[in-house]
Amino acid sequence: MNALRIRRPWRLAAEAAALLVAAVVAFPLYWMVLAAFKPAAEVQSAAPRPWTLRPSLDAFRRVFDQQDFGRYFLNSLLVAGTVVVASGLVAFLAATAVTRFRFRFRTTLLVMFLVAQMVPVEALTIPLFFLLRDAGGTVPGIGLNTLGSLILPHLAFSLPFAVWMLRGFVRAVPEALEEAAYLDGASRARFLWRILFPLVLPGLMATSVFSFISTWNDFLFAKSFIISATENSTLPMALLVFFKDEGNDWGGIMAASTVMTVPVLVFFVLVQRRLVSGLGGAVKD
Amino acid sequence: MTATDTSRASRPSRARRPGAWTPWLYLAPALVLIGGLLVYPLYQLGLISFLEYTQAQVSGGEPTSFQGLGNYTELFRDAQFRQVLLATVVFAAACVLATLAVGCALAVLLTRVRALPRLALMLAALGAWATPAVTGSTVWLFLFDPDLGPVDSALSALGLSGFEGHSWTYDRYSAFGLVLLEVVWCSFPFVMVTVYAGLRAIPAEVLEAAALDGASQWRIWRGVTAPMLRPILVVVTVQSVIWDFKIFTQIYVMTNGGGVAGQNLTLNVYAYQKAFASSQYSLGSAIGVVMLLILLAVTLGYLRLLRRQGEEI
Protein backbone atom coordinates (compact mmCIF):
# COMPACT_ATOMS: atom_id res chain seq x y z
CA MET A 1 0.00 0.00 0.00
CA ASN A 2 2.44 2.60 1.16
CA ALA A 3 5.54 0.60 2.01
CA LEU A 4 7.83 3.33 0.72
CA ARG A 5 6.62 6.01 3.07
CA ILE A 6 7.26 3.99 6.19
CA ARG A 7 10.52 4.81 7.88
CA ARG A 8 13.27 2.26 7.41
CA PRO A 9 13.71 0.87 10.95
CA TRP A 10 9.97 0.29 11.23
CA ARG A 11 9.87 -1.50 7.92
CA LEU A 12 12.75 -3.75 8.91
CA ALA A 13 11.04 -4.56 12.20
CA ALA A 14 7.83 -5.36 10.33
CA GLU A 15 9.68 -7.61 7.94
CA ALA A 16 11.43 -9.43 10.75
CA ALA A 17 8.05 -9.94 12.42
CA ALA A 18 6.54 -11.23 9.19
CA LEU A 19 9.35 -13.76 8.72
CA LEU A 20 9.08 -14.86 12.35
CA VAL A 21 5.31 -15.37 12.06
CA ALA A 22 5.82 -17.27 8.80
CA ALA A 23 8.26 -19.60 10.56
CA VAL A 24 5.88 -20.18 13.48
CA VAL A 25 2.95 -20.86 11.14
CA ALA A 26 4.98 -23.22 9.00
CA PHE A 27 6.51 -25.04 11.96
CA PRO A 28 3.71 -27.60 12.57
CA LEU A 29 3.82 -28.67 8.93
CA TYR A 30 7.62 -28.83 9.02
CA TRP A 31 7.50 -30.94 12.16
CA MET A 32 4.93 -33.26 10.61
CA VAL A 33 7.04 -33.97 7.52
CA LEU A 34 10.19 -34.20 9.64
CA ALA A 35 8.70 -36.77 12.02
CA ALA A 36 7.39 -38.74 9.05
CA PHE A 37 10.92 -39.09 7.65
CA LYS A 38 12.72 -39.63 10.97
CA PRO A 39 13.79 -43.16 11.88
CA ALA A 40 11.61 -44.61 14.65
CA ALA A 41 14.31 -44.31 17.32
CA GLU A 42 14.59 -40.55 16.78
CA VAL A 43 10.82 -40.02 16.96
CA GLN A 44 10.75 -41.87 20.25
CA SER A 45 13.61 -39.90 21.75
CA ALA A 46 12.55 -37.71 24.67
CA ALA A 47 14.77 -34.88 23.42
CA PRO A 48 13.59 -34.40 19.84
CA ARG A 49 15.94 -32.59 17.47
CA PRO A 50 14.58 -30.22 14.80
CA TRP A 51 16.45 -32.05 12.04
CA THR A 52 17.42 -35.57 11.06
CA LEU A 53 20.61 -36.84 9.50
CA ARG A 54 19.24 -40.24 8.55
CA PRO A 55 15.93 -39.76 6.74
CA SER A 56 14.05 -43.00 6.24
CA LEU A 57 10.86 -44.16 4.60
CA ASP A 58 10.16 -46.70 7.32
CA ALA A 59 7.16 -44.85 8.72
CA PHE A 60 5.54 -44.63 5.27
CA ARG A 61 6.28 -48.31 4.66
CA ARG A 62 4.70 -49.18 8.02
CA VAL A 63 1.64 -47.14 7.17
CA PHE A 64 1.06 -48.68 3.76
CA ASP A 65 1.90 -52.21 4.92
CA GLN A 66 0.12 -52.59 8.21
CA GLN A 67 -3.24 -51.12 7.55
CA ASP A 68 -5.28 -51.04 4.39
CA PHE A 69 -3.99 -47.52 3.97
CA GLY A 70 -3.58 -47.58 0.20
CA ARG A 71 -7.16 -48.69 -0.13
CA TYR A 72 -8.37 -45.89 2.19
CA PHE A 73 -6.38 -43.42 0.13
CA LEU A 74 -8.04 -44.60 -3.09
CA ASN A 75 -11.46 -44.48 -1.39
CA SER A 76 -10.87 -40.87 -0.34
CA LEU A 77 -9.68 -40.00 -3.83
CA LEU A 78 -12.67 -41.71 -5.43
CA VAL A 79 -15.21 -40.00 -3.14
CA ALA A 80 -13.65 -36.54 -3.47
CA GLY A 81 -13.11 -36.93 -7.22
CA THR A 82 -16.69 -37.99 -7.88
CA VAL A 83 -18.05 -35.16 -5.76
CA VAL A 84 -15.87 -32.57 -7.53
CA VAL A 85 -16.86 -33.65 -11.05
CA ALA A 86 -20.56 -34.21 -10.33
CA SER A 87 -20.92 -31.06 -8.26
CA GLY A 88 -19.19 -29.04 -10.98
CA LEU A 89 -21.59 -30.23 -13.68
CA VAL A 90 -24.75 -29.88 -11.60
CA ALA A 91 -23.75 -26.47 -10.24
CA PHE A 92 -22.84 -25.24 -13.73
CA LEU A 93 -26.33 -26.06 -15.00
CA ALA A 94 -27.99 -24.44 -12.00
CA ALA A 95 -25.80 -21.33 -12.18
CA THR A 96 -26.63 -20.98 -15.88
CA ALA A 97 -30.32 -21.19 -15.06
CA VAL A 98 -30.21 -18.44 -12.43
CA THR A 99 -27.99 -16.04 -14.40
CA ARG A 100 -29.11 -16.52 -18.02
CA PHE A 101 -32.85 -16.77 -17.48
CA ARG A 102 -35.50 -14.66 -15.86
CA PHE A 103 -38.26 -16.68 -14.30
CA ARG A 104 -40.56 -16.66 -11.31
CA PHE A 105 -39.01 -17.56 -7.97
CA ARG A 106 -35.52 -16.78 -9.29
CA THR A 107 -34.73 -14.46 -6.38
CA THR A 108 -36.34 -16.85 -3.93
CA LEU A 109 -34.07 -19.60 -5.21
CA LEU A 110 -31.00 -17.40 -4.89
CA VAL A 111 -31.83 -16.57 -1.30
CA MET A 112 -32.39 -20.28 -0.72
CA PHE A 113 -28.92 -21.09 -2.07
CA LEU A 114 -27.46 -18.47 0.26
CA VAL A 115 -29.34 -19.69 3.33
CA ALA A 116 -28.56 -23.33 2.52
CA GLN A 117 -24.86 -22.54 2.84
CA MET A 118 -25.43 -21.62 6.45
CA VAL A 119 -27.07 -24.88 7.44
CA PRO A 120 -24.77 -26.72 9.85
CA VAL A 121 -24.67 -29.96 7.88
CA GLU A 122 -23.22 -31.73 10.89
CA ALA A 123 -26.60 -31.40 12.58
CA LEU A 124 -28.11 -33.46 9.76
CA THR A 125 -25.99 -36.51 10.53
CA ILE A 126 -28.79 -38.23 12.46
CA PRO A 127 -31.61 -37.93 9.86
CA LEU A 128 -29.14 -38.68 7.06
CA PHE A 129 -28.09 -41.81 8.89
CA PHE A 130 -31.66 -43.13 8.83
CA LEU A 131 -32.30 -41.86 5.30
CA LEU A 132 -29.23 -43.69 3.96
CA ARG A 133 -30.09 -46.80 5.93
CA ASP A 134 -33.55 -46.91 4.36
CA ALA A 135 -32.26 -45.97 0.90
CA GLY A 136 -29.73 -48.79 1.05
CA GLY A 137 -32.60 -51.25 1.34
CA THR A 138 -34.02 -50.26 -2.05
CA VAL A 139 -30.98 -48.95 -3.95
CA PRO A 140 -27.77 -50.83 -3.21
CA GLY A 141 -24.68 -48.67 -3.44
CA ILE A 142 -25.97 -45.63 -1.58
CA GLY A 143 -26.81 -47.25 1.75
CA LEU A 144 -24.73 -47.13 4.92
CA ASN A 145 -21.26 -48.63 4.68
CA THR A 146 -20.92 -47.79 0.98
CA LEU A 147 -18.90 -45.03 -0.65
CA GLY A 148 -22.17 -43.74 -2.11
CA SER A 149 -23.29 -42.80 1.40
CA LEU A 150 -20.36 -40.38 1.53
CA ILE A 151 -20.61 -39.11 -2.06
CA LEU A 152 -24.29 -38.16 -2.07
CA PRO A 153 -24.44 -35.93 1.05
CA HIS A 154 -21.21 -34.16 0.16
CA LEU A 155 -22.45 -33.62 -3.37
CA ALA A 156 -25.65 -32.05 -2.10
CA PHE A 157 -23.93 -29.90 0.52
CA SER A 158 -21.32 -28.57 -1.90
CA LEU A 159 -23.96 -27.34 -4.35
CA PRO A 160 -25.32 -24.15 -2.71
CA PHE A 161 -21.89 -22.56 -2.40
CA ALA A 162 -20.77 -23.79 -5.83
CA VAL A 163 -23.85 -22.30 -7.52
CA TRP A 164 -23.42 -19.06 -5.61
CA MET A 165 -19.79 -18.74 -6.64
CA LEU A 166 -20.24 -19.86 -10.26
CA ARG A 167 -22.84 -17.18 -10.94
CA GLY A 168 -20.11 -14.60 -11.29
CA PHE A 169 -18.20 -16.69 -13.80
CA VAL A 170 -21.27 -17.47 -15.91
CA ARG A 171 -22.36 -13.86 -15.88
CA ALA A 172 -18.92 -12.76 -17.11
CA VAL A 173 -19.49 -14.50 -20.45
CA PRO A 174 -20.93 -11.81 -22.76
CA GLU A 175 -24.55 -12.15 -23.84
CA ALA A 176 -23.47 -11.19 -27.35
CA LEU A 177 -21.67 -14.51 -27.63
CA GLU A 178 -24.93 -16.31 -26.95
CA GLU A 179 -26.75 -14.25 -29.55
CA ALA A 180 -24.05 -14.98 -32.13
CA ALA A 181 -24.16 -18.70 -31.41
CA TYR A 182 -27.93 -18.83 -31.91
CA LEU A 183 -27.70 -16.73 -35.08
CA ASP A 184 -25.20 -19.26 -36.41
CA GLY A 185 -27.78 -21.93 -35.78
CA ALA A 186 -26.39 -23.51 -32.66
CA SER A 187 -28.88 -25.32 -30.46
CA ARG A 188 -29.28 -24.47 -26.81
CA ALA A 189 -27.47 -27.65 -25.76
CA ARG A 190 -24.64 -26.99 -28.18
CA PHE A 191 -24.16 -23.45 -26.84
CA LEU A 192 -24.27 -24.74 -23.30
CA TRP A 193 -21.65 -27.46 -23.59
CA ARG A 194 -19.45 -26.31 -26.49
CA ILE A 195 -19.26 -22.59 -25.81
CA LEU A 196 -20.36 -21.68 -22.31
CA PHE A 197 -18.87 -24.67 -20.48
CA PRO A 198 -15.26 -24.23 -21.70
CA LEU A 199 -15.43 -20.52 -20.87
CA VAL A 200 -16.64 -21.18 -17.33
CA LEU A 201 -14.20 -24.05 -16.74
CA PRO A 202 -11.59 -21.91 -14.90
CA GLY A 203 -14.31 -20.79 -12.51
CA LEU A 204 -15.35 -24.40 -12.04
CA MET A 205 -11.79 -25.27 -11.06
CA ALA A 206 -11.74 -22.54 -8.43
CA THR A 207 -15.09 -23.65 -7.07
CA SER A 208 -14.02 -27.28 -7.03
CA VAL A 209 -11.32 -26.61 -4.46
CA PHE A 210 -14.02 -26.06 -1.85
CA SER A 211 -15.97 -29.21 -2.59
CA PHE A 212 -12.73 -31.17 -2.79
CA ILE A 213 -11.48 -29.94 0.55
CA SER A 214 -14.71 -30.35 2.45
CA THR A 215 -15.12 -33.88 1.10
CA TRP A 216 -11.49 -34.90 1.53
CA ASN A 217 -11.39 -33.56 5.10
CA ASP A 218 -14.71 -34.95 6.19
CA PHE A 219 -14.49 -36.81 9.44
CA LEU A 220 -18.00 -36.86 10.88
CA PHE A 221 -19.84 -38.55 8.00
CA ALA A 222 -16.98 -40.98 7.42
CA LYS A 223 -17.19 -41.93 11.07
CA SER A 224 -20.98 -42.15 11.26
CA PHE A 225 -21.94 -43.77 7.95
CA ILE A 226 -19.15 -46.31 7.45
CA ILE A 227 -19.72 -48.46 10.49
CA SER A 228 -18.73 -52.05 9.82
CA ALA A 229 -17.41 -52.14 6.26
CA THR A 230 -13.88 -50.95 7.02
CA GLU A 231 -12.85 -51.67 3.43
CA ASN A 232 -14.91 -48.58 2.54
CA SER A 233 -13.31 -46.31 5.14
CA THR A 234 -11.62 -43.09 4.11
CA LEU A 235 -8.34 -41.54 5.21
CA PRO A 236 -9.42 -39.69 8.37
CA MET A 237 -10.56 -42.99 9.85
CA ALA A 238 -7.34 -44.72 8.85
CA LEU A 239 -5.37 -42.04 10.65
CA LEU A 240 -7.01 -42.79 13.97
CA VAL A 241 -6.01 -46.46 13.79
CA PHE A 242 -2.51 -45.41 14.78
CA PHE A 243 -3.68 -43.93 18.08
CA LYS A 244 -3.26 -46.75 20.56
CA ASP A 245 -3.81 -47.01 24.28
CA GLU A 246 -0.34 -48.43 24.84
CA GLY A 247 1.32 -45.43 23.19
CA ASN A 248 0.76 -43.67 19.89
CA ASP A 249 2.89 -44.53 16.88
CA TRP A 250 3.68 -40.87 16.18
CA GLY A 251 5.98 -41.69 13.26
CA GLY A 252 3.16 -43.59 11.58
CA ILE A 253 0.58 -40.91 12.40
CA MET A 254 2.77 -38.18 10.96
CA ALA A 255 3.53 -40.21 7.82
CA ALA A 256 -0.18 -40.87 7.33
CA SER A 257 -0.94 -37.18 8.01
CA THR A 258 1.63 -36.18 5.41
CA VAL A 259 0.06 -38.50 2.83
CA MET A 260 -3.33 -37.00 3.59
CA THR A 261 -2.16 -33.38 3.47
CA VAL A 262 -0.11 -33.46 0.28
CA PRO A 263 -2.97 -33.88 -2.24
CA VAL A 264 -4.78 -30.89 -0.74
CA LEU A 265 -1.64 -28.77 -0.84
CA VAL A 266 -1.08 -29.71 -4.49
CA PHE A 267 -4.70 -28.91 -5.33
CA PHE A 268 -4.48 -25.62 -3.47
CA VAL A 269 -1.31 -24.50 -5.21
CA LEU A 270 -2.75 -25.44 -8.61
CA VAL A 271 -5.89 -23.36 -8.24
CA GLN A 272 -4.85 -20.65 -5.77
CA ARG A 273 -4.68 -17.85 -8.37
CA ARG A 274 -8.16 -18.59 -9.60
CA LEU A 275 -9.30 -19.06 -6.05
CA VAL A 276 -8.42 -15.52 -5.05
CA SER A 277 -10.02 -13.98 -8.16
CA GLY A 278 -13.08 -16.20 -7.72
CA LEU A 279 -13.41 -15.26 -4.07
CA GLY A 280 -13.09 -11.63 -5.03
CA GLY A 281 -15.98 -12.10 -7.43
CA ALA A 282 -18.07 -13.93 -4.87
CA VAL A 283 -17.53 -11.25 -2.26
CA LYS A 284 -18.16 -8.41 -4.67
CA ASP A 285 -21.41 -9.93 -5.92
CA MET B 1 -27.70 -6.97 -14.67
CA THR B 2 -28.17 -4.34 -17.34
CA ALA B 3 -26.79 -6.68 -20.00
CA THR B 4 -29.40 -9.29 -19.18
CA ASP B 5 -32.20 -6.74 -19.18
CA THR B 6 -31.38 -5.26 -22.58
CA SER B 7 -30.92 -8.65 -24.19
CA ARG B 8 -34.24 -9.77 -22.81
CA ALA B 9 -35.85 -6.76 -24.36
CA SER B 10 -34.19 -7.36 -27.70
CA ARG B 11 -35.16 -11.01 -27.99
CA PRO B 12 -38.34 -11.61 -26.08
CA SER B 13 -39.33 -14.55 -28.25
CA ARG B 14 -36.05 -16.38 -27.64
CA ALA B 15 -36.52 -16.30 -23.90
CA ARG B 16 -40.10 -17.51 -23.97
CA ARG B 17 -40.48 -19.77 -26.96
CA PRO B 18 -38.28 -22.79 -26.13
CA GLY B 19 -40.41 -23.18 -23.06
CA ALA B 20 -40.31 -21.45 -19.75
CA TRP B 21 -39.31 -24.78 -18.30
CA THR B 22 -35.72 -24.64 -19.64
CA PRO B 23 -34.27 -23.00 -16.49
CA TRP B 24 -36.15 -25.52 -14.36
CA LEU B 25 -34.67 -28.33 -16.43
CA TYR B 26 -31.20 -26.96 -15.72
CA LEU B 27 -32.04 -26.55 -12.06
CA ALA B 28 -33.61 -29.97 -11.65
CA PRO B 29 -30.52 -32.02 -10.66
CA ALA B 30 -29.43 -29.44 -8.12
CA LEU B 31 -32.91 -29.06 -6.65
CA VAL B 32 -33.46 -32.81 -6.41
CA LEU B 33 -30.15 -33.31 -4.60
CA ILE B 34 -30.60 -30.36 -2.25
CA GLY B 35 -34.22 -31.26 -1.63
CA GLY B 36 -33.54 -34.90 -0.93
CA LEU B 37 -30.35 -34.61 1.08
CA LEU B 38 -30.65 -31.22 2.75
CA VAL B 39 -34.23 -30.02 2.99
CA TYR B 40 -35.84 -33.39 3.69
CA PRO B 41 -33.27 -34.32 6.37
CA LEU B 42 -33.87 -30.89 7.94
CA TYR B 43 -37.55 -31.73 8.21
CA GLN B 44 -36.67 -35.16 9.59
CA LEU B 45 -34.34 -33.60 12.14
CA GLY B 46 -37.13 -31.44 13.44
CA LEU B 47 -39.55 -34.37 13.44
CA ILE B 48 -37.24 -36.74 15.35
CA SER B 49 -36.61 -34.03 17.93
CA PHE B 50 -40.32 -34.16 18.84
CA LEU B 51 -40.45 -37.96 19.09
CA GLU B 52 -39.30 -40.57 21.50
CA TYR B 53 -36.64 -42.19 19.32
CA THR B 54 -34.09 -44.53 20.85
CA GLN B 55 -32.68 -47.94 20.01
CA ALA B 56 -36.01 -49.58 20.87
CA GLN B 57 -37.89 -47.54 18.27
CA VAL B 58 -35.14 -47.85 15.66
CA SER B 59 -35.21 -51.64 15.83
CA GLY B 60 -39.02 -51.61 15.77
CA GLY B 61 -39.38 -53.08 19.26
CA GLU B 62 -41.51 -50.20 20.47
CA PRO B 63 -43.75 -47.78 18.59
CA THR B 64 -42.56 -44.20 18.23
CA SER B 65 -44.50 -41.77 20.34
CA PHE B 66 -44.95 -38.04 20.05
CA GLN B 67 -43.28 -36.14 22.87
CA GLY B 68 -44.08 -32.56 22.01
CA LEU B 69 -41.40 -30.39 23.54
CA GLY B 70 -40.49 -33.15 25.98
CA ASN B 71 -37.01 -33.66 24.58
CA TYR B 72 -36.29 -29.94 24.79
CA THR B 73 -37.42 -29.64 28.40
CA GLU B 74 -35.31 -32.68 29.22
CA LEU B 75 -32.34 -31.04 27.51
CA PHE B 76 -32.62 -27.73 29.28
CA ARG B 77 -33.10 -29.47 32.63
CA ASP B 78 -29.90 -31.42 32.01
CA ALA B 79 -27.08 -29.59 33.78
CA GLN B 80 -24.49 -31.07 31.44
CA PHE B 81 -26.29 -29.73 28.37
CA ARG B 82 -26.42 -26.23 29.83
CA GLN B 83 -22.74 -26.47 30.62
CA VAL B 84 -21.92 -27.70 27.09
CA LEU B 85 -24.02 -24.91 25.55
CA LEU B 86 -22.21 -22.30 27.59
CA ALA B 87 -18.82 -23.84 26.81
CA THR B 88 -19.63 -23.89 23.09
CA VAL B 89 -20.66 -20.25 23.01
CA VAL B 90 -17.64 -19.08 25.00
CA PHE B 91 -15.23 -21.30 23.07
CA ALA B 92 -16.61 -20.24 19.67
CA ALA B 93 -16.47 -16.57 20.70
CA ALA B 94 -12.87 -16.93 21.85
CA CYS B 95 -11.93 -18.68 18.59
CA VAL B 96 -13.63 -16.01 16.47
CA LEU B 97 -12.02 -13.12 18.37
CA ALA B 98 -8.56 -14.69 18.29
CA THR B 99 -8.86 -15.60 14.59
CA LEU B 100 -10.02 -12.12 13.64
CA ALA B 101 -7.37 -10.40 15.73
CA VAL B 102 -4.53 -12.52 14.32
CA GLY B 103 -5.87 -12.41 10.76
CA CYS B 104 -6.41 -8.63 10.71
CA ALA B 105 -3.10 -7.85 12.42
CA LEU B 106 -1.21 -9.97 9.91
CA ALA B 107 -3.15 -8.46 6.99
CA VAL B 108 -1.99 -5.00 8.10
CA LEU B 109 1.53 -6.34 8.57
CA LEU B 110 1.45 -7.67 4.99
CA THR B 111 0.86 -4.15 3.67
CA ARG B 112 3.97 -2.88 5.46
CA VAL B 113 6.56 -5.32 4.10
CA ARG B 114 8.32 -5.93 0.80
CA ALA B 115 7.60 -8.80 -1.57
CA LEU B 116 9.83 -11.50 -0.11
CA PRO B 117 8.63 -11.55 3.53
CA ARG B 118 5.10 -11.17 2.18
CA LEU B 119 5.52 -14.24 0.00
CA ALA B 120 6.94 -16.23 2.94
CA LEU B 121 4.00 -15.37 5.17
CA MET B 122 1.47 -16.00 2.39
CA LEU B 123 2.94 -19.42 1.62
CA ALA B 124 3.03 -20.45 5.27
CA ALA B 125 -0.58 -19.32 5.70
CA LEU B 126 -1.63 -21.15 2.54
CA GLY B 127 -0.10 -24.33 3.96
CA ALA B 128 -1.99 -23.99 7.23
CA TRP B 129 -5.19 -23.17 5.33
CA ALA B 130 -4.90 -26.27 3.14
CA THR B 131 -4.17 -28.66 6.00
CA PRO B 132 -7.14 -30.95 6.67
CA ALA B 133 -8.69 -30.53 10.11
CA VAL B 134 -7.87 -34.11 11.05
CA THR B 135 -4.19 -33.89 10.24
CA GLY B 136 -3.93 -30.40 11.73
CA SER B 137 -5.33 -31.84 14.95
CA THR B 138 -2.95 -34.82 15.01
CA VAL B 139 0.05 -32.58 14.32
CA TRP B 140 -0.79 -30.10 17.09
CA LEU B 141 -1.46 -32.99 19.44
CA PHE B 142 1.99 -34.35 18.59
CA LEU B 143 3.64 -30.94 19.12
CA PHE B 144 2.19 -30.83 22.64
CA ASP B 145 2.63 -34.53 23.41
CA PRO B 146 3.76 -34.95 27.05
CA ASP B 147 6.47 -37.52 26.27
CA LEU B 148 7.68 -36.98 22.70
CA GLY B 149 6.47 -33.50 21.78
CA PRO B 150 8.91 -30.67 21.07
CA VAL B 151 7.00 -28.06 23.10
CA ASP B 152 7.38 -29.70 26.49
CA SER B 153 11.01 -30.58 25.89
CA ALA B 154 11.76 -27.05 24.64
CA LEU B 155 10.11 -25.49 27.70
CA SER B 156 12.05 -27.82 29.99
CA ALA B 157 15.27 -27.06 28.15
CA LEU B 158 14.61 -23.36 28.77
CA GLY B 159 14.77 -24.17 32.47
CA LEU B 160 11.06 -23.88 33.21
CA SER B 161 10.10 -26.45 35.79
CA GLY B 162 6.95 -28.52 35.70
CA PHE B 163 6.78 -28.99 31.95
CA GLU B 164 8.53 -32.35 31.83
CA GLY B 165 5.81 -34.79 30.80
CA HIS B 166 3.18 -32.06 31.29
CA SER B 167 -0.14 -33.07 29.74
CA TRP B 168 -1.90 -30.22 27.98
CA THR B 169 -5.14 -32.12 27.44
CA TYR B 170 -5.76 -33.20 31.03
CA ASP B 171 -6.86 -29.84 32.42
CA ARG B 172 -10.12 -28.53 30.96
CA TYR B 173 -8.95 -25.02 30.14
CA SER B 174 -5.55 -25.95 28.78
CA ALA B 175 -7.24 -28.57 26.56
CA PHE B 176 -9.64 -25.95 25.21
CA GLY B 177 -6.67 -23.62 24.81
CA LEU B 178 -4.79 -26.19 22.76
CA VAL B 179 -7.77 -26.76 20.47
CA LEU B 180 -8.14 -22.98 20.16
CA LEU B 181 -4.53 -22.70 19.00
CA GLU B 182 -5.15 -25.29 16.28
CA VAL B 183 -8.40 -23.62 15.22
CA VAL B 184 -6.75 -20.19 14.98
CA TRP B 185 -3.82 -21.70 13.09
CA CYS B 186 -5.99 -23.24 10.40
CA SER B 187 -8.59 -20.47 10.10
CA PHE B 188 -6.67 -17.17 10.34
CA PRO B 189 -5.35 -17.50 6.73
CA PHE B 190 -8.84 -17.02 5.29
CA VAL B 191 -9.27 -13.83 7.32
CA MET B 192 -5.77 -12.59 6.54
CA VAL B 193 -6.00 -13.13 2.78
CA THR B 194 -9.49 -11.63 2.52
CA VAL B 195 -8.75 -8.57 4.66
CA TYR B 196 -5.44 -8.04 2.86
CA ALA B 197 -7.28 -8.05 -0.47
CA GLY B 198 -9.69 -5.52 1.02
CA LEU B 199 -6.87 -3.26 2.22
CA ARG B 200 -5.23 -3.41 -1.20
CA ALA B 201 -8.49 -2.35 -2.81
CA ILE B 202 -8.51 0.99 -0.94
CA PRO B 203 -7.15 3.60 -3.38
CA ALA B 204 -3.79 4.99 -2.28
CA GLU B 205 -4.92 8.53 -3.23
CA VAL B 206 -7.61 8.49 -0.58
CA LEU B 207 -5.11 7.61 2.13
CA GLU B 208 -2.61 10.16 0.83
CA ALA B 209 -5.22 12.88 0.75
CA ALA B 210 -6.11 12.12 4.36
CA ALA B 211 -2.43 12.17 5.33
CA LEU B 212 -1.92 15.50 3.51
CA ASP B 213 -4.82 16.94 5.42
CA GLY B 214 -2.87 16.14 8.54
CA ALA B 215 -4.87 13.19 9.77
CA SER B 216 -3.07 10.93 12.23
CA GLN B 217 -2.65 7.21 11.53
CA TRP B 218 -5.42 6.50 14.02
CA ARG B 219 -7.75 9.04 12.39
CA ILE B 220 -7.05 7.53 8.97
CA TRP B 221 -7.89 4.08 10.30
CA ARG B 222 -11.07 5.29 12.03
CA GLY B 223 -12.25 7.59 9.28
CA VAL B 224 -11.16 5.90 6.06
CA THR B 225 -9.84 2.37 6.33
CA ALA B 226 -12.31 0.88 8.80
CA PRO B 227 -15.49 2.07 7.02
CA MET B 228 -14.19 0.86 3.67
CA LEU B 229 -13.31 -2.51 5.16
CA ARG B 230 -16.65 -2.96 6.93
CA PRO B 231 -18.35 -5.19 4.32
CA ILE B 232 -15.37 -7.53 4.24
CA LEU B 233 -15.09 -7.63 8.02
CA VAL B 234 -18.76 -8.56 8.24
CA VAL B 235 -18.24 -11.44 5.80
CA VAL B 236 -15.22 -12.90 7.58
CA THR B 237 -16.79 -12.47 11.02
CA VAL B 238 -19.96 -14.30 10.07
CA GLN B 239 -18.03 -17.04 8.30
CA SER B 240 -15.85 -17.49 11.38
CA VAL B 241 -18.83 -17.60 13.71
CA ILE B 242 -20.45 -20.28 11.59
CA TRP B 243 -17.29 -22.36 11.34
CA ASP B 244 -16.22 -22.09 14.94
CA PHE B 245 -19.63 -22.70 16.41
CA LYS B 246 -19.93 -26.13 14.84
CA ILE B 247 -16.42 -27.41 15.37
CA PHE B 248 -16.36 -31.17 15.57
CA THR B 249 -13.17 -32.72 14.23
CA GLN B 250 -10.67 -30.77 16.32
CA ILE B 251 -12.46 -31.40 19.60
CA TYR B 252 -13.12 -35.02 18.78
CA VAL B 253 -9.56 -35.85 17.73
CA MET B 254 -7.60 -33.67 20.15
CA THR B 255 -9.59 -34.37 23.31
CA ASN B 256 -10.39 -37.94 22.33
CA GLY B 257 -14.13 -37.53 21.94
CA GLY B 258 -14.82 -34.71 24.39
CA GLY B 259 -12.11 -34.80 27.02
CA VAL B 260 -11.86 -36.37 30.48
CA ALA B 261 -15.43 -37.00 31.70
CA GLY B 262 -16.80 -34.92 28.83
CA GLN B 263 -15.17 -31.71 30.10
CA ASN B 264 -14.34 -30.51 26.56
CA LEU B 265 -17.63 -31.33 24.85
CA THR B 266 -19.10 -28.83 22.42
CA LEU B 267 -22.63 -28.99 21.04
CA ASN B 268 -21.74 -30.84 17.87
CA VAL B 269 -19.70 -33.50 19.64
CA TYR B 270 -22.32 -33.77 22.39
CA ALA B 271 -25.07 -34.35 19.81
CA TYR B 272 -22.95 -37.01 18.14
CA GLN B 273 -22.25 -38.78 21.44
CA LYS B 274 -25.90 -38.65 22.49
CA ALA B 275 -27.09 -40.08 19.18
CA PHE B 276 -24.46 -42.58 18.15
CA ALA B 277 -22.83 -43.57 21.44
CA SER B 278 -25.92 -43.80 23.64
CA SER B 279 -28.59 -44.20 20.91
CA GLN B 280 -30.66 -41.25 22.15
CA TYR B 281 -31.42 -40.07 18.64
CA SER B 282 -34.23 -37.73 19.66
CA LEU B 283 -32.06 -35.88 22.17
CA GLY B 284 -29.25 -35.66 19.62
CA SER B 285 -31.69 -34.21 17.10
CA ALA B 286 -32.99 -31.68 19.61
CA ILE B 287 -29.40 -30.50 20.19
CA GLY B 288 -29.03 -30.22 16.41
CA VAL B 289 -32.16 -28.06 16.24
CA VAL B 290 -30.86 -25.76 19.00
CA MET B 291 -27.60 -25.37 17.08
CA LEU B 292 -29.50 -24.70 13.89
CA LEU B 293 -31.64 -22.00 15.50
CA ILE B 294 -28.61 -20.21 16.92
CA LEU B 295 -26.87 -20.21 13.54
CA LEU B 296 -30.09 -19.16 11.82
CA ALA B 297 -30.20 -16.11 14.06
CA VAL B 298 -26.61 -15.28 13.09
CA THR B 299 -27.45 -15.73 9.40
CA LEU B 300 -30.51 -13.50 9.58
CA GLY B 301 -28.47 -10.83 11.29
CA TYR B 302 -25.92 -11.18 8.48
CA LEU B 303 -28.57 -10.81 5.77
CA ARG B 304 -29.93 -7.69 7.47
CA LEU B 305 -26.46 -6.21 7.62
CA LEU B 306 -25.97 -6.91 3.92
CA ARG B 307 -29.33 -5.33 3.13
CA ARG B 308 -28.50 -2.26 5.14
CA GLN B 309 -25.31 -1.88 3.14
CA GLY B 310 -27.44 -1.81 0.04
CA GLU B 311 -26.08 -4.98 -1.52
CA GLU B 312 -28.36 -6.77 -3.91
CA ILE B 313 -28.40 -10.41 -4.75
Image: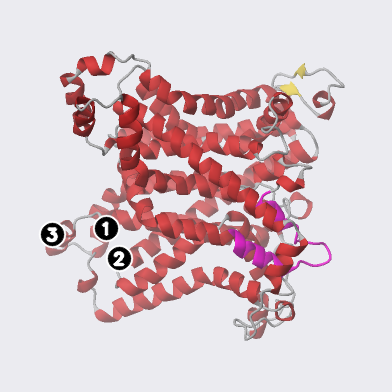
As drawn, is A25 to the left or to the right of B230? Answer: right
Q: Quadrant of residue B107?
A: bottom left
**Nearest to the observer: residue A256 or residue B169:** A256
Q: Which residues are magenta?
A: A234-260
Residue at mark 3: chain = B
The answer to whether any part of residue A123 appears in the image is: yes
- The local secondary structure at tag 3 comes to helix
Which residue has dot 3 on it? B209
The earlier-in-sequence mark between 3 and 1 is 1
Identify the colour scheme used: secondary structure
As drawn, is A11 to the left or to the right of A113? Answer: left
Residue at mark 1: chain = B
Location of residue B86 in the rendering, given as x and y in whole percent from the top left corner: 63, 44
- In the picture, the disc for residue B31 is none
Q: Is residue A253 a member of the stretch shown in magenta? A: yes
Looking at the rendered image, the quarter that the C terminus of chain B falls into is: top left
- In the picture, the disc for residue B111 is 2
Residue at 31% from the left image edge and 44% from the top image edge: A281
The answer to whether any part of residue B129 appears in the image is: no
Q: Amino acid at mark 3?
A: Ala
- The local secondary structure at tag 2 comes to helix
Q: Residues within 10 Å of mark 3 (few under 14, many from 20)?
A: few
Location of residue B101 in the rendering, given as x and y in whole percent from the top left corner: 44, 59
Residue at 33% from the left image edge and 32% from the top image edge: B307
Do the residues at pointers 3 and 1 share their chain? yes
- In the picture, the disc for residue B200 is 1
Location of residue B38 in the rendering, given as x and y in whole percent from the top left corner: 56, 29
Q: Amino acid at mark 1?
A: Arg
The earlier-in-sequence mark between 2 and 3 is 2
Q: Residues within 10 Å of mark 2 (few under 14, many from 20)?
A: some
Name the outermost residue toward the right. B61
